[in-house]
Amino acid sequence: MLTKKKKLSKKEIKQDKLVTFYYKAYGYFEENKTKILYYIVGLVAVVALSVFYIYHRNQQNKEAGLELSRVIPSFDSGSYLEAIEGRAGSQNTGLKKIVSDFGGTENGETAKIYLADSYNMLGNYDEAFKYYKDYSGSIDMYKATALAGQGGYYASKGEFEKAAEFYAKASRVSRSDVLNPGYLLQAGINYLKAGKNSDAKDELTAIGKDYISSPEYREANQYLSQLE
């Protein structure tokens, strides 16, 4: 006598599918285990290298910070050549070496700005421009300094419109930068020299809108009066 086939419950169906999946996965692994193991080893190697790289960069950044702290006193005292080249017989290795050894780290990039500023103060504008342009750090204050430095370079070459554009960019990096009024003023002055009166007015007017308490506000008004 034929008996009625028992209907599987949902739980039993799920269990059956799970068992089927397990054996399929097991079979696939057995057929491809060599290739899979290579992938796993490769992945572990990539992760290990990434961790090592991050650790190494952090250590380099710390070392660059220490080296930079030894140079800053020379820079602050106005000994710019010593800041650039270092001082023999001391721990001051100089900004040029710090940039060479640690450029790409955050502190190495900061050293690049100090190096550019030092060359600028010594009148070596081409070298200063090279390092301002090459800055690739993430600190907003130094991003703005790098842009303004390039603006100053173009102004010294008589390329006033280009100079104004860089100063204007510098003023827009961060609203909290205390040097913004100065950047805006220089942008306005250079636009005036380039004959771009409308652009000059925009930059000079921005000082009164956002930085009315700054020393540059009065000077900006003097230039604006010339445009009326």
Image: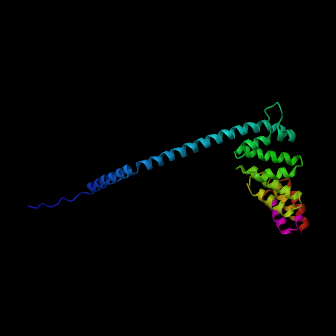
Decide which of 161, 206 is in the foreground and name it.
Answer: 161
Is residue 181 visible in the rendered structure shown here? no
Judged left or right of residue 84, residue 37 is left
Q: Is residue 177 above or below residue 160?
A: above
Which is the main secondary structure of the residues drawn in magenta? Answer: helix
Q: Quadrant of residue 207?
A: bottom right
Residue 174 picture quarter: bottom right
The answer to whether 190 is drawn above or below residue 39 in the figure is below
Which residues make up the magenta segment? 192-208
Which one is nearer the viewer's eye here, 53 or 39?
39
* Residue 15 lies in the magenta-colored region: no
Position in image of residue 214 (x %, y %): 83, 53
Is 57 left or right of 30, judged from the image as shown? right
Question: x, y (%) of residue 133?
Answer: 78, 54
Question: x, y (%) of residue 135?
Answer: 75, 51
Tell me which corner region of the image, top left, top right, bottom left or bottom right, holds residue 70: top right
**Residue at the spot 70% in from the left edge and 47% down from the top edge:** 104
Residue found 88% across the figure and 47% down from its top: 121
